[in-house]
Image (cartoon, helix red, strand yellow):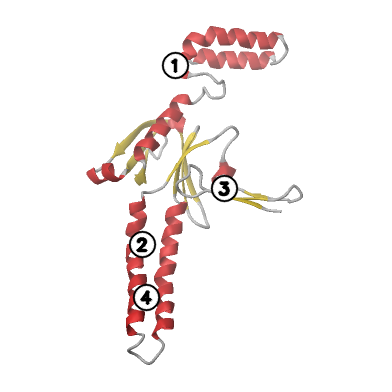
């Protein structure tokens, strides 16, 4: 027995999940989810703005419409079968359009609680990721039309050898930048369940609670010392 769940591009997570029954041996998941580390979560997915896709397929759409219209116009004027020939010719730009849509759809920019990931490719995949710990700065560039239609360029400056990674004409750039900065600020706190703005004043209380857990045998001495060191390093 199979169950299918399809989420479309407007959703936060876009994927096709195929889940087999308990007797099945495999489960097909979203490609990106298979690369996530333990406790790593996807916070935001983005793609290039729809105008980029439209610019790539507008000529193909025009050719498809033109071939169909010409076929209907010539149908009563010529003896040979124009309609089948026209429909046959339509396949060429249609294939090109499907290809462009798939390329656009599979190029994604993802923010997780640990890193920023860029994926591309329909059948073969190219993945580039940058740890949020290494992100030094995030620059946002928007033109007048970018502000009107909500797209822009995101430049991520990192401490790695690459130096900078640029996501051009990304949709919702402000939301993307905000998600990155918020994720970077929360790094190291999610595992402890502590709000950053309250961490410094709550450190003694948290250490006391951890000590109580240690005395009750819920956590080991090693775990207590590790968490204690992590808390003290944050102040």
Q: Please state the horizontal and vertical placement of residue 70, each as a whole percent of the image.
A: 33, 79
From the image, state whether disc 3 or disc 4 is nearer to you.
Answer: 4
Q: Is residue 14 above or below residue 220?
A: below
Count neighbours of disc 4 (C-alpha within 10 A) and say few if under 14, some if 14 to 19, many if 20 or more: some
Tell me the distance, in whole angstroms, between the alpha carbons under discs 3 and 1. Answer: 35 Å
Tell me the residue at 48%/42% (across/down).
Answer: 12
Residue 159 in sight from this viewpoint:
no
Q: Secondary structure at mark 1?
A: helix
Count neighbours of disc 2 (C-alpha within 10 A) and say few if under 14, some if 14 to 19, many if 20 or more: many
Q: Count the marks: how many?
A: 4
Front residue of 80/24: it is: 80
Q: Decide which of tag 2 and tag 1 comes sooner along the chain.
A: 2
Q: Please state the horizontal and vertical placement of residue 30, each as a whole percent of the image.
A: 57, 47
Tell me the distance, in whole angstroms, between the alpha carbons under discs 2 and 1. Answer: 48 Å
Q: Is residue 171 above or below residue 65?
A: above
Label 4 close to label 1 by CB (< 8 Å)? no
Q: Decide which of tag 4 and tag 1 comes sooner along the chain.
A: 4
In the picture of the structure, the residue carrying the numbered disc 2 is 57
Front residue of 72/125: it is: 72
Side (left or right) of 215 relative to 120: right
In the picture of the structure, the residue carrying the numbered disc 1 is 197
Q: Which mark is residue 30?
A: 3
Q: Which mark is residue 134?
A: none
In the picture of the structure, the residue carrying the numbered disc 4 is 68
Q: Decide which of tag 2 and tag 4 comes sooner along the chain.
A: 2
Tell me the distance, in whole angstroms, between the alpha carbons under discs 2 and 3. Answer: 26 Å
Q: Decide which of tag 3 and tag 1 comes sooner along the chain.
A: 3
């Amino acid at each position: 027995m199979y169950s299918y769940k399809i989420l479309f591009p407007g959703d936060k997570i876009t994927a096709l999940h195929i889940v087999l029954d308990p007797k099945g041996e495999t489960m097909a998941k979203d490609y990106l989810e298979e690369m996530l580390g333990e406790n790593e979560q996807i916070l935001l997915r983005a793609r290039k703005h729809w105008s980029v896709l439209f610019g790539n397929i507008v000529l193909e759409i025009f050719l498809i419409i033109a071939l169909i219209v010409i076929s209907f116009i010539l149908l009563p004027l010529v003896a040979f079968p124009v309609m089948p020939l026209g429909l046959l010719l339509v396949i060429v730009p249609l294939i090109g359009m499907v290809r462009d849509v798939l390329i656009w759809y599979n190029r994604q920019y993802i923010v997780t609680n640990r890193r920023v990931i860029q994926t591309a490719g329909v059948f073969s995949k190219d993945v580039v990721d940058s740890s949020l710990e290494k992100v030094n700065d995030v620059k946002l560039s928007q033109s007048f039309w970018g502000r009107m239609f909500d797209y822009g360029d995101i430049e991520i400056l990192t401490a790695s050898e690459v130096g900078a990674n640029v996501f051009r004409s990304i949709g919702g750039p402000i939301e993307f930048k905000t998600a990155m900065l918020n994720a970077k600020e929360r790094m190291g706190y999610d595992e402890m369940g502590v709000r950053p703005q309250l961490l410094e004043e709550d450190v003694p209380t948290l250490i006391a609670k951890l000590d109580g857990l240690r005395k009750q045998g819920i956590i080991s001495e090693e775990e207590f010392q590790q968490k204690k060191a992590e808390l003290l390093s944050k102040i």
